[in-house]
Amino acid sequence: MTVIAAQPYDYPLPVDSRRIALVIIDMQRDFLEPGGFGEALGNDVSRLLAIVPAVKQLQDAFRAHGLMVIQTQEGHCPDLADCPPSKRERGQSNLKIGDQGPMGRILVLGEPGNAIIPDLKPKPGETVIAKPGKGAFYQTELEEVLRSHAISHLIVTGVTTEVCVQTTLREANDRGYECLLVEDATESYFPEFKQATLDMVRAQGGIVGWTATTEQVLAGLKTFV
Ligand code: C5J
């Protein structure tokens, strides 16, 4: 059996490599770039930017092996019909979803700040899932896409670890997907929340899934495809 060295134990790869997909969550300008929404809220975005080379390495490797790469993008339609009032009203920030932010309307699809960062720009034909919630399965076509491509294994990356990444991992795990979270290709504005998420995912024999480094994933992929 081919595996990726991982925690809490080796991650078994499927016999058919086409069943594995890379999922890149919400690597959007507003969350990552200086001058964006994340920084306007007082967050240190350099923490998130630091994972871009690792995510890019994985994106390049999956593309080179002809494996599926899926990106997600948190955003709402311009009339905010898909944004629950609770989500818009939550918090005490002056900037709310739909307001004019430093890079266009906050969390509105099609706005400059809502785009995926240029370094990870999807290629024509690659799947991009626009999602109104934290989890990538909620009110999206993700499950249908995965089923139509017979995907069973998800290598998960992106931001932020304890919010959209963890929610998506849990949704995927409940749907039967074998999930591996890449330790150095995910990040949070809060280092302790990232660490807690890694610990939670792989606790109790991998109750939500596995974790491994980018290097371990790349080494596993090499023996696999
Ligand atoms: C947040 C995300 N934190 N991608 N989004 O609102 O984690």
Image (tube, rainbow, N blue to C red):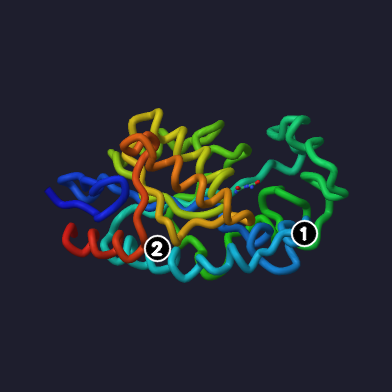
Task: Estimate the x, y position of residue 219 in percent, counting from the top left.
Answer: 24, 64
Write down the residue under mark 2: 59
**Secondary structure under the numbered disc 1 in the rendered image:** loop
Residue 72 lies, with reference to residue 48, above or below; the image says above
Of discs 1 and 2, which sits in the foreground? 1
The amino acid at mark 1 is Gly
- Quadrant of the image occupied by residue 222: bottom left
Residue at the spot x=68%, y=33% of the render? 82
> Who is closer to the viewer here, 141 or 199?
199
Q: Is residue 2 visible?
A: yes
Q: Quadrant of the C terminus?
A: bottom left
Left or right, residue 57 beside residue 79: left
> Who is closer to the viewer here, 78 or 41?
41
> Who is closer to the viewer here, 56 or 54?
54
Residue at the spot x=45%, y=48% of the render? 198
Residue 42 image label = 1
Residue at the spot x=71%, y=48% of the render? 108
